Image (cartoon, rainbow, N blue to C red):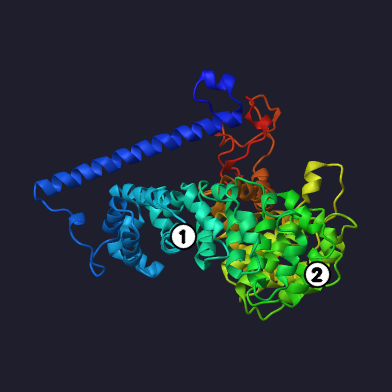
């Protein structure tokens, strides 16, 4: 923890020091803001006195007044009338807010950030129990929170501006309290909280959580907007554990299971489950330990409760299967593996569903080389032939084949548990019919090797490495037909990824340059020295150690590999 001085660190606990620092920063921010407002008022006064004119001296007209100018009016005169003018000046839609005339204010650049900060500060200081004023305030916050960050995030990143309306609003505790305390009274409150929680910065969600976001949303969690807002908070509040939202006394496993089956919130609840299961292991295990939670997910994959629910459900199951201990449990659910196989059957009407299903299949195949493991006994024979069939298919895009390649590599590679413990035995990997494998090499793997995507190329090269190590002689003719050697040689010169170059060079040395090395060996014959004795070594054309290796085969795809005994003079 940071302390402001040695005296502070000696007298205060870490929490007290942090609180003291926060108070000091807030005082400094208020003082700086007050100073900017005083300077602004002084410049306006001088402009009027010199008769140069100023935007705020012009009466407001909804048809031609700019939002920033109306906000200045409210800062100078915080009343219901000027607040109403601010509301009327804001376009009704996000698209309208992104219009050219509004961009300086929306991007909060230069002086516009000062205006925005002063407006929010004034709004927070003048929040009152008056129903009309509160309603206007909430409607304005709904619009301002909607334009940040998702609608303009890319431009904020481009211009290097880290400020946003969400950050400014979250900094005002009185405004956050106003929103949270009126959840259930105003529809706009849930929209505001959902918009604020979608801010990916580390500034907003912690403040919402500390103000009581989770209990407020859970009080009306059966409303789709509340479920959406809660999902945003779980997804973006990475400074807290997921258990701050999902636990027996908050969002329980039983409650989430019920929501997944409720038509009104089923799709959003599925995304909520996917967000939670993508977090810490402890929270994942909390949900998985519920007696019927995983079975419900599987049943909903077969018969979704609502449209568009299946993609987040597959993502949830994949996150569960990412933990080794959960794979036997999932494969023990009778309907699970048939449901996965069914989703992989053509025709592929939904590409996103297909890719998520392939990813899930890959998670199930990580332990496929462990003897007597459910992954090797159940998942491998059911899924690997389908994956190889898709790899040789000409109907998939390169992106889809890349996902299939990831899953195949999971099935072929050494299980992670064997890397941690070399004493654990593992079996050779399973391959389907040789004709299917050959088709996969010709129509899929070689294309990925030549891909400009480093991830795809690395995956394909590792598949080739495993195939050649285990079944090299059987598939070598197919490799030559596919001209794998030239593809690997191109990768050796690749500057994109060192790993690709290393693996490709090793394969060339071990499997493709053997004939060249054997031909070079033929040039080596015993010769006679000047006294007539036999001299074993190179021909006379190579006369010094510095010339050794110039006519040998290319080792590792880069240069000659010379045995150490040949380099000795």
Q: Splitting the image into 4 quarters, where does residue 317 fall? A: bottom right
- Image height of 18 relative to 282, above or below: above
- Residue 482, percent from left and from top: 62, 65
The earlier-in-sequence mark between 1 and 2 is 1
Label 1: element kind: loop
Name above or below for residue 169 compared with residue 316. above
Name the disc covering residue 126, or none: none
Residue 410: x %, y % from top left:
73, 57
Camera-side residue of 66 and 529: 66
Residue identified by numbered label 1:
150
Mark 2: secondary structure: helix
Residue topped by disc 2:
336
Real-space Cα distance between discs 1 and 2? 36 Å
- Neighbourhood count class around disc 2 (C-alpha, 10 Å): few under 14, some 14–19, many 20 upward: some
Residue extending farthest left: 51
Point out residue 1 in the picture as x, y percentages from the top left corner.
57, 29
Q: What residue is drawn where x is 23% and y is 63%?
A: 60
- Res 441 seen here: no
Q: Does residue 218 show up?
A: yes
Question: Are the residues at dot 1 and dot 2 in contact (C-beta closer than 8 Å)?
Answer: no
Q: Is residue 73 left or right of residue 157?
A: left
């Amino acid at each position: 923890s940071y302390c402001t001085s040695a005296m502070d660190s000696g007298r205060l606990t870490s929490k007290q020091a942090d609180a003291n620092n926060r108070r000091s920063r807030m005082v400094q921010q208020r003082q700086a803001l007050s100073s900017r407002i005083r300077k602004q008022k002084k410049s306006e006064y001088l402009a009027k006195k010199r008769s140069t004119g100023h935007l705020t001296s012009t009466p407001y007209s909804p048809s031609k007044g700019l939002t920033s100018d109306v906000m200045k009016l409210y800062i100078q005169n915080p009343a219901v009338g000027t607040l109403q003018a601010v509301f009327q000046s804001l376009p009704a839609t996000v698209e309208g807010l992104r219009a050219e005339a509004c961009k300086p204010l929306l991007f909060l650049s230069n002086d516009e950030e000062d205006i925005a900060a002063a407006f929010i500060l004034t709004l927070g200081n003048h929040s009152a129990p008056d129903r009309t004023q509160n309603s206007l305030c909430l409607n304005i916050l709904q619009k301002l929170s909607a334009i940040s960050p998702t609608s303009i995030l890319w431009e904020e990143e481009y211009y290097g501006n880290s400020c946003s309306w969400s950050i400014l609003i979250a900094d005002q505790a009185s405004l956050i309290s106003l929103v949270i305390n009126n959840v259930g009274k105003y529809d706009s409150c849930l929209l505001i909280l959902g918009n604020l929680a979608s801010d990916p910065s580390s500034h907003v969600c912690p403040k919402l959580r500390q103000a009581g976001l989770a209990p407020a949303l859970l009080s009306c969690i059966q409303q789709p907007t509340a479920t959406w807002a809660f999902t945003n908070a779980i997804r973006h509040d990475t400074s807290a554990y997921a258990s701050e939202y999902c636990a027996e006394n908050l969002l329980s496993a039983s409650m989430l299971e019920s929501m997944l089956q409720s038509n009104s919130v089923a799709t959003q609840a599925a995304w909520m489950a996917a967000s939670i299961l993508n977090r810490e292991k402890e929270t994942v295990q909390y949900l998985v330990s519920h007696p019927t939670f995983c079975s419900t997910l599987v049943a909903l994959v077969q018969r979704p409760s609502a449209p568009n629910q299946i993609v987040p459900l597959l993502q949830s199951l994949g996150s569960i299967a990412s933990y080794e201990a959960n794979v036997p449990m999932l494969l023990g659910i009778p309907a699970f593996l048939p449901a996965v196989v069914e989703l992989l059957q053509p025709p592929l009407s939904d590409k996103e569903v297909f890719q998520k299903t392939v990813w899930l299949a890959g998670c199930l195949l990580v332990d496929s080389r462990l003897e007597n493991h459910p992954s090797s006994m159940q998942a491998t024979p059911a899924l690997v032939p389908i994956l190889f069939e898709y790899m040789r298919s000409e109907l998939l895009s390169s992106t889809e084949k890349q996902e299939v390649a990831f899953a195949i590599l999971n099935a072929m590679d050494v299980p992670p548990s064997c890397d941690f413990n070399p004493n654990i035995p593992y079996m050779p990997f399973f391959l389907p019919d040789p004709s299917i494998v050959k088709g996969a090499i010709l129509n899929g793997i070689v294309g990925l090797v030549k891909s400009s995507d480093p991830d795809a190329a690395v995956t394909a090269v590792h598949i080739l490495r495993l195939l050649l190590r285990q079944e090299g002689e059987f598939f070598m003719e197919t490799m030559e037909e596919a001209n794998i050697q030239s593809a690997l040689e191109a990768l050796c010169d690749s500057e994109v990824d060192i790993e690709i170059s290393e693996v490709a060079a090793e394969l060339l040395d071990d499997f493709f340059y053997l004939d060249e090395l054997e031909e070079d060996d033929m040039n080596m014959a015993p010769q006679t020295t000047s006294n007539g004795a036999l001299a074993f070594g190179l021909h006379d054309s190579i006369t010094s150690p510095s010339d050794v290796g110039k006519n040998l085969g290319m080792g590792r795809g880069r240069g000659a590999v010379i045995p150490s005994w040949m380099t000795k003079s």
